[in-house]
Image (tube, rainbow, N blue to C red):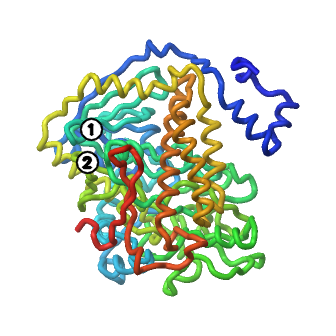
Amino acid sequence: MSAEDDTTAPTRREFLAMTGVTAGIASLGMQAWAQNAVEIDVDAITNTDHATDVLVIGGGMAGLFAAVKAHDAGAATMIVSKGRLGSSGLTPFGKGFFVFDPDTESGTIDEFVEKVSRSALGTSNPVYTRQLAEHSLDRAAELRNWGYFDQTLANRPFMTPIEERDIPLLERVHVTHLIKEDGRIAGAAGFRLDAEETVTIRAKSVILCTGAGGFKPNGFPLGDLTHDGTIMAYEIGAKVTGKEWNDGHSTRTVNPAACYDNWGDMFERIPSTNGVEVHHDLGVDINYQAYMSGNPVAGGPGSAPSDDTVEVEGGPYVPEEFQGRMQPAGDGEGGGPRSGEGGAPGGPPPGFAASSNVGGASAGMAIHKSEGLVPFDDRCASNIAGLYAAGDALGSHMAGGIYTQVGSSLAGSAVQGAIAGEAAAEYADTVETPVIRDERLGEITDEILAPLRREAGYGPAWVTQTLQGIIIPNFVLYIKKGTMMQAALAYVEELRDHHAPMLRAANMHELRLAHETRNMILSAEMKLRASLMRTESRCSHYRLDYPEVDDENWRAWINIYQGTDGAMQLEKQPFDTGPT
């Protein structure tokens, strides 16, 4: 079969042959490799150069507040978003906003911080938990003033403060590289999704508000979150944390891949606020039940017990104080349930009703605020001078390795974005505009466009599907054991070393897919290595071969960084050594 033949669609006979197990793998591999039929003139791609004091990467809740507060602190500020402001990442999904109001809460902030820590089995960082409570009321007031709580979509309310301040906004730009010069951040580079153009931005400081990421799973609106910020920062020396934790959202067995069908009732809601409601939820108990008794299972977090539920022994540990399903506690502001995640008023979140559910809908994403760059102070700074992160891009462990507080994700992003914005502006005021060597810019441009220049290679969609088949199964990603993770890691290393360098792209859309696929491969390696290292079960990390909580050896976070030889390195950071 020639390379030209490989690019044609398979016949019915060939397609049926590909459904065989052994023959299927070989055939799919042949179909994945093909000549690159480039649709654009790569040599005609232009570059646009920008400069600013503070560059905010990401158009969600954290990015909004980072940009507003950096501007208000006197810094020239620019936002770059892979999507649309207020429609990026999980922004359309978030409807609940936590507010700690001292005038209405019966407990104190100290009590709230301590209760979160108990639920999180010590994995939470009290500094960032406290910030959430202390600043949430002010951030909610600003959002209310911009009209955020009056409509279903966030774009218009988000644009209000941006337009009032005339903050430059670049949308539909995929940032692929962070640039470091002389040991500090110097800017970023990427390309436009809708034009044949690369983009270079020189900046005194950068705030990553790029969210978390998944492996483009079905059944959840997570397709454009692919760990871009985490991987860019890792590759210039930033430390990353929290990769062993897992978000446990499920989807319905009826049309499981249809995000809107399963979550549309949530999309149609206006945002609302809620108060303290600490719990221990969105772990892997349903995944464990499915593993032990078979898929699918009835119910899910927030649902009432079903008559069809099969009781199984063992499973993830839940503190006695927090045992029992989270029950919605009535309507929140705007007529929505306090869960802030949709569903009928007073009912469970969508996807979690007493029906048959399957896991993996958010595969690859960790618990909100538990993965991302390691914070080196209480102001969202990384270990790279001038590089900050906020929201789900910062591994603040605000709520630890388990989801503990309804509405804390959006509120935490707003709070951390504001803190990072002010800190980045202050830093930018102390340094000169960075000088980026022309040679380095040329190297980066070559790296960005490499898939377009490749004469032949692997299609990014096929490599992504292969990665999903390796990493997403319940017995690999959620109900873990060393033998399976070691096997999966061998496959992921093969994708990293052989397939990622050979990714091809025919146009700007496939160029995006190629870079996203590479980022997901490295993130999968991080998740497997961190999960192998943590030889215990705690919160949303569960191992069949180490099913107990081990406080003697594992009261520590796991940080990941790139060694001098380029290899991935892991280290423990004790819980009591976070920023103060």
Which quadrant would residue 50 be assigned to in this image? top left
Q: Taking 156 as reference, is 573 above or below it?
A: below
Which of marks 2 and 1 precedes in the sequence? 1
Disc 1 from disc 2: Cα separation: 9 Å
Classify 10 Å Cα crowding around label 2: few (below 14), some (14-19), many (20 and above).
Answer: some
Q: Nearer the viewer, residue 24 or 280?
A: 24
147 to the left or right of 325: left
Q: Taking 241 as reference, is 260 above or below it?
A: above
Q: Nearer the viewer, residue 81 or 488?
A: 488
Instruction: Give, as a three-letter code, the residue at label 1.
Output: Lys
**Label 1: element kind:** strand
Residue 39 visible from this viewpoint: yes
Q: Taking 270 as reference, is 553 above or below it?
A: below
Question: Where, quadrant-wise, is the C terminus in this rendering?
Answer: bottom left
Say which residue appears at 40% left-offset and 68% top-offset.
399
**Contact? badges 1 and 2 (CB < 8 Å):** yes
Say which residue appears at 41% left-offset and 47% top-offset.
567
Which quadrant would residue 574 be assigned to in this image? bottom left
> What residue occupies the far front of the structure in this picture?
565
Instruction: Give, as a three-letter code, the residue at label 2.
Output: Ile
Residue 185 in the image, given as x and y percentages of width and height: 25, 40
Say which residue appears at 55% left-offset and 36% top-offset.
498
**Label 2: element kind:** loop
Residue 180 circle label = 1
478 to the left or right of 235: right
Residue 189 in the image, given as x and y percentages of width and height: 35, 31
**Residue under circle 2?**
384
Q: Nearer the viewer, residue 104 or 323?
A: 323
155 to the left or right of 290: left
